[in-house]
Image (cartoon, rainbow, N blue to C red):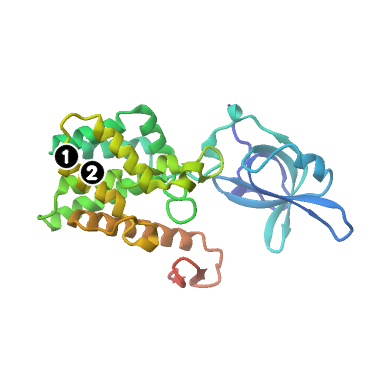
Amino acid sequence: MKTKEIYLKDIKQGDKVASTFLAAEKNMAFSQKGSPYLTVRLKDKTGEIESKVWDNAVEFDRLFKKGDIIFIEGKAASYKNSIQISIVNIKKSSREEIEPTDYLPVAKADVNGMLNEILTYIGKIQNKHLQELLNSFFQDEKTADLFKRAPAAKGFHHIYLGGLLEHTLSVVRLLEKVAEHYPNLNKDMLIAGGILHDIGKIYEFSYDSLIDYSDEGRLIGHIVMGVEMLNKKIDAIPDFPPQLSLELRHILLSHHGEFEFGSPKRPKTLEALVVHYIDDLDAKLNAFETFITDSTNADSDWTSYNRFFERFLYKGR
């Protein structure tokens, strides 16, 4: 496996560039003189940069597709106050030669440590049926591996490898605190619902190259997929209490809260209501913080207009 030569954040005006990047986008266009040129959006875990292929654009266009890892040679220049790379050569790279985490953003915290903390929460659950159910998910090597790598979303919150695990752990930590404040809540049900509420996302997204929806993710969605996964696990456990199954499935089905946000059901138990609000809080805080961090408007205490939140966000002084 090759060591990546340079990351996009380290490229400066005038640098000669020879390294591998993820082709996040590519588009063929024509100049005013009718000559074809290729625009390629290069990506790695540190950011994205637009690049241009002015010569042999048609030939290079045939060599790779969106989502491929490519080795490029070129030179960086300043264009409209941003760095742009003029590419003179492209070669497609083999997947076996690269480390995927070099090309997509990853969670800052160690994924193995985060997963171990999830397993610790499972070990503290008093209800043996729920504990057995959760162990059946996370003692499965394939499920655990996907859960460590999956993002939590494509374009809103925790949009990076390990994002699903980071989000889930954050939700579970908060749920434990809420259970301490409201002793009438069923803590075991809360924790189990928090751990499993987004489990379908390990298959909703593809994340071997670009983060995108899988076919199943677009056609079915993580809520229904998660309940299907849950049903299979419950069916394999002898004498799993039907009422326990009913309430846990309801948490998964209602965790988006309202019909307009894709929730098949609205929360109708205390635990489902709490999981919904904590899930929503954690997702929005991450999205809010990420938008502020990524803001390029350095001359202002405010970000640009955020279309999701429908407001400008205050960065502070």
The residue sitting at 76% across, 39% down in the picture is 62
Query: Can residue 40 be spotted in the picture?
Result: no
Residue sitting at x 30%, y 51% = 253
Q: Under tag 2, what secondary structure? A: helix
In the image, residue 97 lies at what x, y percent?
Answer: 60, 28
Q: Mark 1 points at which residue?
A: 125
Q: Is residue 233 found left or right of 100 in the rendered image?
A: left
The one of 16 and 132 positioned closer to us in this rendering: 132
Q: Count the numbered circles shown.
A: 2
How far separated are the C-alphas under marks 1 and 2?
Answer: 8 Å
Q: In this view, does 298 lie above or below 57?
A: below
User: Is 102 displayed left or right of 145 in the figure?
Assistant: right
- Contact check, label 1 and label 2, Cβ < 8 Å: yes
- What residue does disc 2 label? 192
- Tell me the quarter of the image containing the N terminus: top right
Q: Which residue is drawn at 39% across and 63% down?
A: 260
As drawn, the residue found furthest toward the right would be 33
Q: What residue type is labelled 1?
A: Ile
